[in-house]
Image (cartoon, coloured by chain):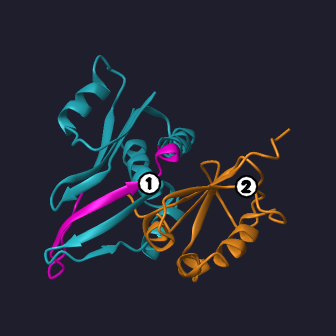
Chain colours: A orange, B cyan
Amino acid sequence: MADVEAPLTILYFAWLRERVGASEEQLPMPTGIATVADLIAWLTERGPGYASAFANRRTVRCAVNQEFADPATRIGPGDEVAFFPPVTGG
Amino acid sequence: MARISVQQADFNVGAEFAALTAGRTDIGGIGCFVGTVRSNPGERVAAMTLEHYPAMTERAIARIVEEAERRWSLLGCTVIHRIGRLTAGENIVLVLAASSHRQAALDATAFLIDWLKTKAPFWKREELADGATTWVEAHEADDAAAARW
């Protein structure tokens, strides 16, 4: 059983980190958030940096607990959600 | 057993080759790919900085290697990816894949680098000679290369 009090950890990489202005933050799990898409919608209301980071959703990828995920992926307290652009390694 | 490393330091291709093949007589071929920092004519890329997702990177690479091992009969495999600031001409990534026969070794090597480019959490920021920096954008051609496998 997940600890309902556990915070949500959110990580940002590359230009999402620059636009948000932070590489990591921990938040109490916002109420009414069930999926990554819900979280993105909630984050975009937090300020212009967030709105800019998520302005073009097609260029945002995500991972939940270090596994690639998609907007429909369910999230809960204690999870680590990462947002980043399409990868460009190799 | 694959060797996977994410590191700032450069790698020595010869030493990695020797480590992969030491004491082995069953290997018939080894595929090798080395990716380096390229400065296109006119772009004057002086350096690039590779950022990654430390908690996820090695696991993501391990998944890619496992997929290669499912698809080809590999006798050994090495993936080394560098991070941090790298100047033009420096090594970025090394892939070695050993098998009994050349086709598996060559195909697995190409597969590994194609999937590394699209399924491992690295991001490149280029630094031009005038000091301007820009995040490298993902290329559809890379997605297509990964999808052909």
Residue plotted at (47% across, 41% down): B58
As drawn, the label of residue B35 is none
The answer, for residue B35, to whether it is visible in the render is no
> Residue pushed farthest top?
B23
Check disc 1 and give the amino acid type.
Answer: Leu
Instruction: Please state the total of marks drawn on the protein image.
Output: 2
* Numbered circle sitting on residue B116: 1
Residue B35 part of the magenta-drawn span: yes
Spot occupied by residue B143 in the image (x, y as percentages of width and height) = 49, 69
Say which of B30 and A50 sits in front. Answer: A50
**Residue designated by label 2:** A28
Q: In this view, does B91 lie to the left or right of B7?
A: left
Q: In terms of depth relative to the viewer, which is nearer, A33 or B59?
A: A33
Alpha carbon of mark 1 to alpha carbon of mark 2: how far?
34 Å
Task: Report whether B31 appears left or right of B122.
Answer: left
Foreground of the two, B49 or A12: A12
In the picture provided, is A83 more to the left or to the right than A38?
Answer: left
Q: Where is residue B149 in the image (x, y as percent from the top left)?
A: 53, 58
Relative horizontal placement of residue A61, taking residue B25 as reference (left or right): right
| x and y percentages locating residue A73 in the rendered image | 75, 60
Question: What's the chain of the residue with tag 1?
Answer: B
Q: Position of residue B50 (x, y in %)?
A: 33, 57
The region drawn magenta spans B34-57
**Neighbours of disc 1 within 10 Å: few (<14), some (14-19), many (20+):** many
- SS for callout 2: loop
Residue that appears at 46% across and 75% down:
B140
Task: Determine whether A75 is above or below B101 in the image.
Answer: below
